[in-house]
Image (tube, helix red, strand yellow):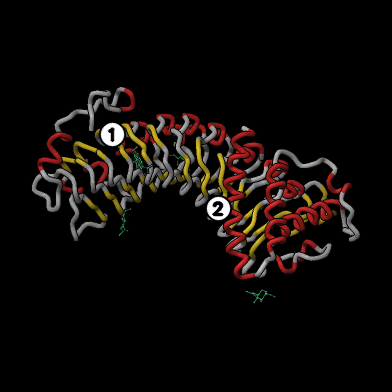
Amino acid sequence: MAKNLSKQASGCFLFCSLLISFVTFSSALSDAEVSFIARRQLSSLKENEDLPDNLENEINIKETFANERLKRAYIALQAWKKAIYSDPFNTTANWVGPDVCSYNGVFCEEALDDPKLSVVAGVDLNHGDIAGYLPVELGLLTDVALFHINSNRFCGIIPKSMSRLTLMYEFDISNNRFVGSFPLLVLEWPSVKYIDIRFNDFEGPLPPQIFEKDLDALFLNNNRFSSIIPDTLGKSKVSVVSFAHNKFIGCIPKTIGNMVNTLNEIVFLGNNFTGCFPQEIGLLGNVTVFDASHNEFIGVLPKTFSGLKSLETMDIAYNKLIGYVPETICKLPNLANFTFSDNYFNGEAQACMPSTKGKVVLDDFNNCLPGRPKQKSTKQCFPVVTRPVDCSKNCGRWWPHQKW
Ligand SMILES: *[C@@H]1O[C@H](CO)[C@@H](O)[C@H](O)[C@H]1NC(C)=O
Ligand SMILES: *[C@@H]1O[C@H](CO)[C@@H](O)[C@H](O)[C@H]1NC(C)=O
Ligand SMILES: *[C@@H]1O[C@H](CO)[C@@H](O)[C@H](O)[C@H]1NC(C)=O
Ligand SMILES: *[C@@H]1O[C@H](CO)[C@@H](O)[C@H](O)[C@H]1NC(C)=O
């Protein structure tokens, strides 16, 4: 683990150094300042392992504060300001002096455990375009329940010290430049409901425990995750989950059926998922959006899909699906858009044929459908449509001798 961290750290260092040299052009930092910032960051990344327990007492601060928690917030926010290399909208320009509640993007509320105390309960720097990193001192913001820094240029890793923010409810760090493995510290937040880490560079596997948290939404899309989806998926109470545009592999776990009471939208788009769709997907009577397009799914559509009573949008394009597209799907009561183009289907119900009259948008382009326009050639279709896939075994993966 430690080895991994240092590898990521040096990667970030390189990235941030490039960033700094870029910043140098515009704001003319001296070489000495650049090397100071770079050193500051490196040492901070080493500190990521822990936050000294009595930091606030060790630091000598002249200002006086309404309470100790605001003093700790001041230390955290000043450290953060020092870890910022570029702030084009001057968002943090007023992060000066002891009145942290007046800082741009910082929100104070009564403390949950003591209404007489005003504390920093939220940080919102969304769309700040700020470049920098998250210093270990952020672990001092222990009253923060909302942490929104989406659409900035923060890099590096999420400091472990942030596991101390045990009131965290909404955590949105999307659209930044964070790296490293899945930030495990989020598992330590007891009441977190919303986790959005999409559009970063996180990599490696997902911890199975993430689906055991009582989350309402989980956005993992547009990273570099490369594992299977663990069977714990079925324990998740999320209404929305997106795995899109990663490098996930393997089958959709059968446990997905257990998400029946809570799941509304699930997006597998743009990975390397394979195998047949499990029958259990058909149990998901509250799902409105199901997107499994641009993967390597095989086999036939399970008959159970007729159980997707709330389905509005289904996209299964760009897979290797075969067989018949049944009326029971195309006539689902709320269906508005069903895209099954770019597969190897060789039959479809009348109700599934695109028509200008129907209220459902349908797309059957580039399949193996006899008599339909713009289909694959016989030569492309024949070897696939004549090869049965046993979806009851091995989640329908082909036997090794069955080369594509
Ligand atoms: C930010 O502050 C700098 C220096 O005071 C100023 O030149 C720049 O115009 C400010 N930018 C914005 C977006 O206000
Ligand atoms: C899927 O796997 C293939 C072959 O291993 C690879 O070339 C491709 O880039 C992968 N696609 C994604 C989205 O990871
Ligand atoms: C769908 O949601 C409702 C509550 O909105 C719930 O009562 C029901 O059990 C859910 N499941 C299915 C399969 O409809
Ligand atoms: C239907 O869904 C497809 C695929 O998700 C999308 O590209 C298309 O724009 C949608 N069409 C309409 C009319 O919403």
Left or right: 265 with respect to 206? left
Residue 375, horizontal then vertical, whole percent = 14, 49
Looking at this view, is 134 or 252 the one in front? 134
Residue 347, horizontal then vertical, whole percent = 15, 41
Residue 177: which disc?
2
What residue type is disc 2 on? Answer: Arg
Tag 1 secondary structure: loop
Residue 26, horizontal then vertical, whole percent = 61, 70
Tag 2 secondary structure: strand
Residue 125 visible, this orientation: yes
Looking at this view, is 404 or 186 the one in front? 404
- The image shows residue 10, relative to residue 60, as above or below, that is above
Looking at this view, is 47 or 108 the one in front? 47
Residue 336 location, quadrant: bottom left
Residue 9 location, quadrant: top right
At 57% from the left edge and 46% from the top edge, which residue is drawn?
11
Residue 331: which disc?
none
Left or right: 364 with respect to 158? left
Q: Quadrant of the N terminus?
A: top right
Q: How many marks?
A: 2
Left or right: 250 with respect to 355? right
Q: Quadrant of the C terminus?
A: top left
At 19% from the left edge and 41% from the top edge, which residue is drawn?
345
Q: Which residue is mark 1?
A: 302
Some atom of ligand 3 lies within 8 Å of the CB belonging to the residue at label 1 = no
Judged from the image, the quadrant occupied by ligand 4 is: bottom left
Residue 172 visible, this orientation: no
At 52% from the left edge and 50% from the top edge, which residue is drawn?
200
